[in-house]
Image (cartoon, coloured by chain):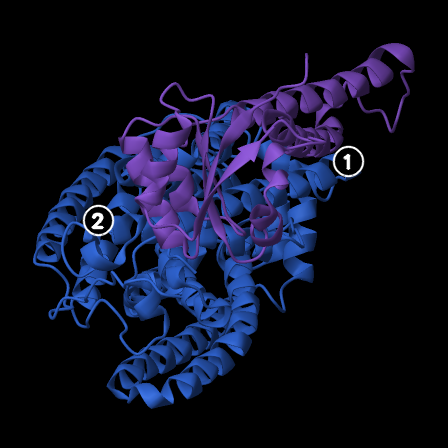
Chain colours: A blue, B purple
């Protein structure tokens, strides 16, 4: 069709803009400040218990950003689409933060006895006699011993991190090689990335399920839910998409994202995020409905611990924060096309994800189950994860600066440089 | 309503969407308000060019969805609490978690139906007759490969001779007069 082309040209410098240094500095300052606050709270509380619980929350949250970023990277290689090209380098940078998450995990592993009942209880019958654990817990701990023991915890964790590390290394290395290759090889590269990513998504789903079952679900050794892995998988996508939108829009204040971020792709990302908001509540509610309907003594105490004793307030707020607010706001087409407002909603979603994890983690412990009460310790949840996420952001910025922000050897690049509403 | 007679409007035919959009944008800028674009596939810029504004479909969808959800939830509450209370495994008769799923489905169903039928109604569809189909080039081209701009006679600026001259200034393939 005869029509003139108005395609934009990609700027010569594709490196991260200078203000990423500023983000990094700010993140480090916040990280240090909140570390000091966390230490102060631990002194006021006189115990390190809550520091570790909050640490676990921070670890699971940053794990979601890092490995969830890797998963979304693999998904976009398989699905294609211009949004994928847009996110590719930020997602690669997220996946390369895995070493920091590993360090966070090592700290959890070193404090197994403080966090996990199954690790703390050595002699089950003695613990039962002394009244430390009840009969149900004693039975569960004994029955699940082959799976829930420190050795299995460490080995599973190491295997999972090794697998994620492999995929991170492979995809990141090939991503650079692809840019150096000639455009004639592009179709081969697309196939190659797909062939790695497709099985990678399956492997990720399995390893991630195993990891969260050990790290979070086993905090209560008596309880189990078959949808648990999927719930975290969707939760990670929820968090990672929100984070990606924040990163992409913040980067668009300068080149090269100023050129390549179009309203169409921003809108698409908003829609995708909306889908995950929906899927997240769908799964969470399904789990609740099934357990509520069954009303079995093996399952229902987990919810009762999280509803009774003022936890009802938290679960209600969780529903509002985690679903109602993002859902109603992201329904709006105008909001999804507005940079400032979309970023605000996404920041809120990252907070809501952390709030949801608080509701999942804290009631596992005997002093908090069915009894939400104030202590200096509980404030650690507002200090330790903030510091950990801030350090993570600083590390992420380092990784973001190491490569050009746009992959050039990709057919979508020409499309993304065209003006919006192209005449077919 | 008595049958309308006379000129419906002037129809200009273009070969490319780009030409159509340029003409439509200019016409809108020159003060034309009763005008419309016809293209074989959605061309978003054409809608923008003639001053597309918000419509009431989102509002209809929202109202439809809320009504669907409320109706189903109400029905379930009425059956389980008032009309036919049953003791199911000792659960309360007002078991809201169990009511959510059908209420949700009805929300989606009625939101979807409201969007689809609301869109049709606001478009004035179904319409059994449209004067533009009197133009043979429109019949043949509007759904295949031609792009049309129609200046309607209802526009206060409309004057048959002047409007024809005006449209011809965009160098269309043809300009034809369409009768009711």
* Residue drawn at (14%, 66%) of the image: A11
Residue A144, quarter of the rendered image? bottom right
Of B36 and A97, nearer the camera is B36
Which mark lies nearer to you, 1 or 2?
2
Query: Could you say where residue A133 lies in the image, as x and y percent from the top left?
Result: 60, 45
Residue A414 lies, with reference to residue A248, above or below; the image says below
* Residue drawn at (64%, 31%) of the image: B120
Q: Is residue B138 left or right of residue B159?
A: right
Q: In this figure, which residue is indicated by the disc labeled 1? A: A293
Query: Could you say where residue A309 lies in the image, as x and y percent from the top left?
Result: 54, 23
Of A173 and A335, nearer the camera is A335
Question: Can residue A58 be seen?
Answer: no
Do marks 1 and 2 both belong to one polypeptide chain?
Answer: yes
Query: Could you say where residue A177 lies in the image, as x and y percent from the top left?
Result: 29, 86
Q: Secondary structure at mark 2?
A: helix
Q: Is residue A393 left or right of residue A285?
A: left
Residue B160 lies, with reference to residue A180, above or below; the image says above
Of A386 and A378, nearer the camera is A386
**Quarter of the image that includes the C terminus of chain B:** top right
Chain under numbered label 1: A
Q: Is residue A118 left or right of residue A379?
A: right
**Quarter of the image that includes the N terminus of chain B:** top right
Chain under numbered label 2: A
Residue A55 lies, with reference to residue A302, above or below; the image says below
* Residue at far front of view: B161
Q: In this figure, which residue is indicated by the disc labeled 2? A: A250
Q: Residues within 10 Å of mark 2 (few under 14, many from 20)?
A: some
* Lower position in the chain sequence, tag 1 or tag 2: 2
């Amino acid at each position: 069709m005869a029509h003139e082309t108005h395609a934009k040209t990609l700027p010569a410098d594709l490196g991260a803009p200078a203000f990423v240094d500023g983000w990094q500095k700010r993140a480090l300052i916040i990280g240090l400040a909140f570390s000091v606050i966390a230490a102060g709270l631990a002194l006021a509380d006189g115990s390190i218990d809550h520091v570790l619980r909050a640490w676990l929350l921070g670890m699971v949250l940053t794990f979601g950003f890092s490995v969830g970023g890797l998963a979304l990277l693999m998904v976009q290689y398989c699905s294609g689409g211009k949004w994928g090209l847009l996110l590719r380098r930020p997602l690669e940078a997220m996946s390369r933060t895995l070493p920091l998450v590993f360090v966070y995990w090592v700290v959890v592993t070193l404090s197994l006895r403080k966090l996990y009942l199954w690790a703390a209880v050595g002699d089950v019958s003695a613990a039962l006699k002394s009244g430390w654990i009840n009969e149900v817990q004693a039975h569960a701990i004994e029955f699940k011993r082959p799976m829930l023991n420190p050795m299995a915890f460490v080995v599973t964790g190491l295997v999972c991190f090794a697998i994620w590390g492999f995929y991170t290394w492979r995809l990141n290395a090939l991503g650079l090689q692809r840019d150096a290759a000639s455009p004639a090889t592009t179709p081969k590269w697309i196939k190659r990335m797909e062939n790695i990513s497709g099985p990678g998504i399956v492997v990720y789903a399995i390893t991630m399920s195993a990891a969260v079952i050990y790290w979070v679900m086993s905090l209560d050794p008596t309880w189990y839910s078959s949808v648990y892995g999927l719930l975290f998988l969707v939760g990670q996508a929820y968090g990672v998409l929100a984070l990606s939108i924040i990163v992409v829009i913040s980067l668009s204040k300068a080149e090269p994202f100023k050129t390549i971020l179009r309203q169409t792709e921003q809108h698409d990302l908003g829609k995708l995020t909306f889908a995950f908001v929906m899927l997240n509540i769908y799964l969470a509610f399904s789990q609740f409905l099934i357990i509520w309907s069954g009303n079995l003594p093996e399952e229902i105490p987990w919810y009762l611990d999280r509803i009774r004793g003022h936890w009802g307030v938290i679960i209600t707020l969780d529903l509002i924060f985690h679903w109602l607010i993002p859902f109603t706001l992201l329904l709006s087409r105008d909001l999804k096309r507005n940079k400032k407002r979309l970023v605000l909603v996404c920041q809120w979603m990252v907070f809501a994800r952390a709030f949801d994890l608080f509701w999942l983690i804290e009631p596992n412990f005997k002093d908090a189950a069915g009894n939400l009460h104030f202590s200096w310790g509980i404030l650690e949840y507002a200090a330790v994860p903030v510091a950990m996420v801030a350090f993570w952001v600083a590390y992420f910025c380092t990784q973001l600066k190491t490569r050009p922000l746009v992959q050039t050897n990709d057919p979508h690049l020409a499309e993304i440089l065209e003006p919006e509403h192209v005449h077919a | 309503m008595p049958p309308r007679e006379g000129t419906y409007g002037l129809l200009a035919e273009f070969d490319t969407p780009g030409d159509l959009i340029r003409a439509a944008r200019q016409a809108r800028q020159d003060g034309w308000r009763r005008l419309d674009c016809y293209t074989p596939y959605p061309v978003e810029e054409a809608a923008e060019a003639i001053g597309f504004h918000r419509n009431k479909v989102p509002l209809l969808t929202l109202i439809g969805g809320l009504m669907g959800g409320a109706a189903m939830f109400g029905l379930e509450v009425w059956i389980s609490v008032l009309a036919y209370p049953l003791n199911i495994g000792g659960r309360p008769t007002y078991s809201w978690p169990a009511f959510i799923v059908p209420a949700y489905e009805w929300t989606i169903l009625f939101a979807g139906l409201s969007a689809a039928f609301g869109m049709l109604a606001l478009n004035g569809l179904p319409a059994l007759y449209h004067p533009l189909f009197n133009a043979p080039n429109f019949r043949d081209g509007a759904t295949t490969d031609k792009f049309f701009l129609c200046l309607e006679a209802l526009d206060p600026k409309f004057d048959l001779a002047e409007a024809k001259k005006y449209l011809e200034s965009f160098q269309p393939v043809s300009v034809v007069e369409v009768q009711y």
